[in-house]
Image: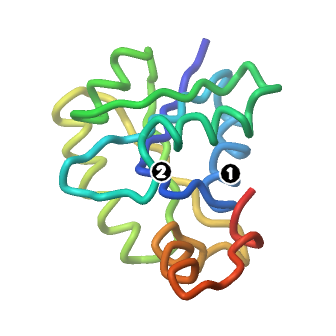
Amino acid sequence: MKTGLFAGTFDPFTIGHASVVRRALLLFDRVVVGVGVNDAKHPEASAQQRVEAIRKLYADDDRVEVVAYSGLTVDLARECGAAFIVKGVRSVRDYENEREQADVNRRLSGIDTVLLLAEPGLESVSSTTVRSLRSFGRDVTEFLP
């Protein structure tokens, strides 16, 4: 079974993230969504809340597994048997960051990264934007699955 790992903070999980999962399922038999716990970040929702929200979205799809993790993404990839790490790319800036991280991950583990370009219209969707809009009392439902 070919497995891809899609890891991130997902605070919150957006329609852009859902797009990556949907398209990753066209490439892989199974997608593990790794919800990162990072002491350097201070998410609005707890890891458990984020995991539960994403699990609810994919409750009817046994090809998607959602787990919380801390530490290196490549270590989680090994643990879950992922042959590839999947990342979404919205911009040149994202590409540069992800390319550098992909190089490090490959050196550490031999695990390659698959970059999926944002679908048209989703390039500006980010968790940061959603949190910012929400802080100003704006309705963010159009950005959430």
Considering the numbered disc 2 on the image, is that residue within a helix, a strand or a loop? strand
Please determine whether, in this image, residue 24 is positioned above or below residue 43: above
Spot occupied by residue 59 in the image (x, y as percentages of width and height): 76, 27
Q: Residue 18 carries which label?
A: 1
Q: Are marks 2 and 1 in contact (CB under 8 Å)?
A: no
Q: Which amino acid does label 1 sit on?
A: Ala
Q: x and y percent of residue 45 in the render? A: 46, 52
Q: Which image quarter is the N terminus in?
A: top right
Q: Which of 10 and 84 is in front in this view?
A: 10
Q: Residue at x 25, y 36 (%)?
A: 106
> Residue 87 has which mark?
2
Q: In the rendered view, tell whether residue 58 sits above or below residue 81.
A: below
Instruction: Using the image, tell me which numbered label, if any, was put on residue 46.
Output: none
Residue at 65% in and 85% down? 138
Q: Which colour scheme is used?
A: rainbow
Comes first in the chain, label 2 or label 1 = 1
Q: Which amino acid does label 2 sit on?
A: Lys
- x, y (%) of residue 52? 60, 34
- The answer to whether residue 103 is left or right of residue 117 is left
Question: In what element is the residue under mark 1?
Answer: helix
Q: Is residue 95 above or below residue 115?
A: below
Name the mark nearer the viewer: 2 or 1.
Answer: 1
User: Would you call the spot at circle 1 few (<14 residues within 10 Å), some (14-19), or many (20 or more)?
Assistant: some
The percent position of residue 12, horizontal first and vertical second, equals 54, 58
Is 4 situated above or below 62? below
